[in-house]
Amino acid sequence: MRWSLPKPVYYASMITTTVGVAYLTKDYFGGKKYEGEENLEGKVIIVTGANSGIGKETARAFAARNAKVILACRNKERCEQARKDIVIETKNKHVYCRKCNLASQESIRNFVTRFKNENSELHILVNNGGVMRCPKSYTKEGIEMQLGVNHMGHFLLTNLLLDVLKQSAPSRIINVSSNAHLKGKLQVKDLNSTEKYDPYEAYAQSKLANVLFTRELAKRLKGTQVTTNAVHPGIVDTEITRHMTLFKNLYFKYFIKPFIWPFIKSPKQGAQAILHVALDPKLDNITGSYFSNNEVANISDEAKDDKLAKWLWLVSEKWTKLNVT
């Protein structure tokens, strides 16, 4: 006599198996988990764009290791909610919310002034905040938004904090870039995308700028025990895709995304790459590199151009009025 499961039990079993396989697949493609258990008590860390996504998960991991963590965010209300979530989960009360709008150089300078009034040390700076493929728009200073936020804002923030980072050495600067830099071109004659604006090209340019900035900064910090590296966290399911029409499409949301979901990293998985570059003791003397999948990865020929990196640095100084007191 042939035995078979009742249909409800059979279908429930199939669904459970499918979901289980999906989670195992996501875990596999999520990359390596950072296994270090460093106690960061006494360490001061800044994470930009920390109210959601990779930034929030990175800040959460630092707080769980007992660090003092400053969430530098544009939206004060969402930042405060993120702070509460992290404090409740980690039991670490030394998590602070501070306003820092990367699209406003005035806001960045105000953030730094307050930070220095409240802190005398800074051990890790994670330049994570950013925008992606947004409609053509400008920062308060008139800089194309993706270049202005992803590069110029972090360029200014980092340079204004260098004195504290040097005093706190050994310290680390992590610039969150992307493999999109591989297709990026620095538009020397139209850096601000005045003549032509393509959302993807502008994004790729800003991510290339992150790598060029990292390499030039590493040279300027030689001998200071302050290291700086760029990192590609992978393809991560975060709010940074908010401006991409595809992700707003209902067909994509309900019929395509469920099938590709196992192959896209969660914010927590994406944060592992940043934690590796920020904390791994093996990287104490590694600087000016670009990491992907927890390994030093190749960069584009344009990203290797030292003259271009120096040119971008000088332009960035001018556009951020870095040396103007």
Image: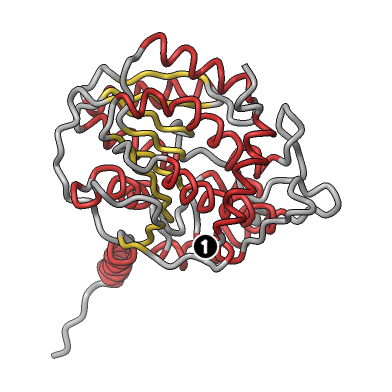
**Residue to which mark 1 is pinned:** 304
Q: Position of residue 120 (x, y in %)?
A: 32, 15
Residue 8 in view, yes or no: no
**297 up-or-down from 169: above or below:** below
Residue 237 in view, yes or no: yes
Residue pictured at 23% horizontal, 46% vertical: 284
Q: Quadrant of residue 263?
A: bottom left
**237 up-or-down from 42: above or below:** below
Secondary structure at badge 1 equals helix
Residue pictured at 44% horizontal, 26% vertical: 161
Q: Residue furthest top?
A: 117
Residue pictured at 20% horizontal, 22% vertical: 42
Name the image quarter holding the N terminus: bottom left
Residue pictured at 41% horizontal, 9% vertical: 117
Q: Residue furthest front?
A: 223
**139 up-or-down from 273: above or below:** above
Q: Residue furthest bottom?
A: 1
- Horizontal side of residue 276 vs 130, given as left or right: left
- Count of marks overlaid on the render: 1
Q: Amino acid at mark 1?
A: Lys
Nearest the camera: 258 or 111? Answer: 111
Nearest the camera: 233 or 166? Answer: 166
Q: Position of residue 308 (x, y in %)?
A: 62, 55
- Horizontal side of residue 209 vs 238, given as left or right: right
Q: Position of residue 312 (x, y in %)?
A: 63, 47
State the colouring used for the structure image: secondary structure
Nearest the camera: 222 or 61? Answer: 222
Name the image quarter holding the C terminus: top right
Q: Residues within 10 Å of mark 1 (few under 14, many from 20)?
A: some
